[in-house]
Amino acid sequence: MKKTLSVLLSLALVVTMAAGCSGGTTTSSEDSDVIKIGVFQPLTGANAAGGELEVEGVELANQLRPEVLGKKVELVIADNKSDKAEATTAAARLIEKDKVVAILGSWGSSLSIAAGDVVKTNQIPAVALSATNPQVTAGNDYYFRVCFLDPFQGTVMANYASKKLNAKKVAIIQEVSNDYSVGLAKFFTDSFVKLTGDPNAIVATGNYNTGDQDFNGILTNIKAANPDVIFAPGNFTESALIIKQARALGITAPFIGGDTWETNEFITVGGADVEGAVMSTFFDDTNPLTEAGKTFVAEYKKAYPDRANIAAVTALGYDGYMMTLDAIERAGSADPVAIRDALAETKDFEGATGMITIDANGDATKNEAIIKTVKDGKFTYLDSVTVD
Amino acid sequence: MKETQNSIGAYLKAHWKTVLFLVVLLIGIGLADNFVDSYLRRLLNLCAIYVIVSLSMNLVNGFTGQFSLGQAGFMAIGAYTVAVFTVPIESRAAIFYLEPMAPFLANIQLPFIVALILGGLAAVVVAFFIGSPCLRLRGDYLAIATLGFSEIIRIVFTNTQSITNGALGIKSIPTISSLWWTYGTALLIIIATVLLINSTYGRAFKAIREDEIAAEAMGVGLFKTKMTSFLIGAFFAGIGGGLFAALLGTVDPKQFYFTLTYNFLLIIVLGGMGSISGTVIASFVVTLGQEALRFLDEPMAFGLDLPIFRPGLRMVVFSFLLMVIVLFYRKGLMGTNELTWDFIAQKYHAIKQKLSRKKASTEGGGQQ
């Protein structure tokens, strides 16, 4: 009993001490010469890696531009645990407890969709950084985004397959449990059928689930259909395994995919077999599209000298912050509704990932995507594709 | 006992504390509903939903002694029923943009309460088909089968694109923000569970938990009784899932991974397997505790920047606290006890006695 008591007491002590300290910070920052911007991201759980990269971009931007309207900008970072229920409480907390005027995030469309209702009813503008699902902004006046959408990326790859690779027949392998992959596959199909004029241009479709290891069943069907190109958007580990197993089966058709492939794990898992795999992405650090992009790359290299390459989502985090600050400046006040109106009017904003104009849905209209390929075990710039 | 229940007046006299407590509770919910900000409201709603689902799990695991791990699956059924039937018809085309909604469903829209009950009933039907083979067996088979089932449900929902919108999920579900929906349902379910546990069925549940062979020898129909408990549990979990969908306003299959079930397993183990009040307490402790520890994720203003205060620390501390509780309260916070007035009085006297004894012994020590 004594032992229990002592353990519990010491715990209580630690907790109250810590609570006291944190209480001190919140009261000191509640004065009016600080503008608070919430960042809600998965920093623990399945999507932690993605969230971390976006926060890096936001923090870098904050260091470069720490003030707007003569007031200091304070970032409030909230973890949503890669969990939907947690995402809604984290967003509500940022709004009610921390009184943020705008929210950036989150990595993962479903987490952003879950928070959508909260930002809408509380009238706080939110900017999604890399959430590509059209439903994030659809029917929600308070959600914006700086990245391009699934439809655009699907169209880009269809154009690439049809015009650059001269493909006539394509096979699709999609990760059915992943909204991103299903969306990309659908828009690729629509666009590719239109480009070739052949309703049977998609010769085979294979479905798999996140975490699957063996794809020989799907690949045997695809081999029989003999496609010119295989489009396989999806998670990097599974995609790398698919390519490996396809090569082992003797399939020689080139593989193309989306931006999720651009991780080091893709190359470590796939090894020599993923050489020549082609993907579309938002950003290329060796070839920035804009002046802002060059500044961003230089500053990032200064801040993180030991990183080999810059993730596209980091650049998007940077853009999201800069665009929000630009909107606050144009609004001339830190009133959330005024910021929302200013965000909606964003036109030709020069971001690190390209020129951003917000359309009626709240989406960034971008017409240029980067095409990268794996060469000598590295992601290398291949081409950029413009779609009208 | 029988005489006192004959008239309402006498009943009130005998249970005035409970009645008073209920009245205070209802007034409290009413006040909270009007004055609490949306953040706390969301948390309180989540607490109530966790109470519902944990109770449903405790009914099967704690009271009947059948190890079932299918709660995430039953919740998914309830949640998707509410989602599919309450999404406004005009926004369906925008949500089902990959593949249009199946024509037999596309024009059906039901009131929330109807969809909620339908979700519970759908969970019951599914539970019947899993229960029929598995509950005839003894041992761990039910755990394995229900765990498998909840994964199957998730994968089915991922692949039925025209009904559930697959991996894209459904959004724009009309949301509930009033506390009355969740707390009203939770109260009804708590009362129903208390009545059930104290009825003949409840005694049969406990008999099976203690010893199946002895229970059978006493004339308890094993299969039928287990099935009753399992189906009622599934119904409650389905209702909880439906409320969950309406609270978040969106559902997708990834929400219902089997890891969701472990949240509720944690709650019932923490509260005490076989204690209704323990489950209620633990639901609040776990849900509010995780939020209360959120300050640990933020960098601290200690003057010096300690690197351990980074996202994820609260989970570490939370797990540590859980370990402490499990180490010192092996049967959970409440064991199989209920938080009744007698229990409180008993504890109060025990503590009082202990203190006075301690006082006496220290005084005695002083004299020597």
Image (cartoon, rainbow, N blue to C red):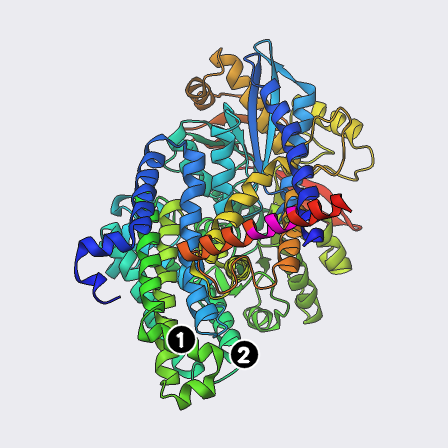
Q: Position of residue A136 (x, y in %)?
A: 45, 40
Q: Is residue B105 left or right of residue A348?
A: left
Judging by the rendered image, the residue that carries numbered circle 1 is: B205
Kind of residue at badge 1: Phe
Q: Magenta includes A227?
A: no
The residue positioned 52% from the left and 31% from the top of the image is A94
Q: Is residue B120 left or right of residue A133?
A: left
Q: Image quadrant of residue B299?
A: top right
The numbered disc on residue B287 is: none
Judging by the rendered image, the residue that carries numbered circle 2 is: B140
Q: Nearer the viewer, mark 1 or mark 2?
A: 1
Q: Is residue B239 left or right of residue A315?
A: left
Residue that extends furthest to the left in the rendered view of this protein: B7
Q: Image quadrant of residue A311?
A: top right
Q: Over which residues does the magenta segment extend?
A: B353-359
Q: Read off the chain for label 1.
A: B
Judge by depth and name the residue closer to the eye, A113 or B175: B175
Disc 2 crowd, CA 10 A, few/some/many (<14, 14-19, 20+): few
Q: Are callouts 1 and 2 both on one chain?
A: yes
Which secondary structure lies at badge 1? helix
- Confirm whether residue B166 shows in the render: no
Judge by depth and name the residue closer to the eye, B305 or A183: B305
Q: Position of residue A29 (x, y in %)?
A: 60, 19
Kind of residue at badge 2: Asp
Disc 1 crowd, CA 10 A, few/some/many (<14, 14-19, 20+): many
Contact, mark 1 vs mark 2 (Cβ under 8 Å): no
Residue at mark 1 to residue at mark 2: CA–CA distance: 18 Å
Q: Image quadrant for the N terminus of chain B?
A: bottom left
Q: Position of residue B281 (x, y in %)?
A: 47, 52
The image shows residue B336, relative to residue A351, as above or below, that is below
Mark found first going from the N terminus, 1 or 2: 2
The image shows residue B215, relative to residue A351, as above or below, that is below
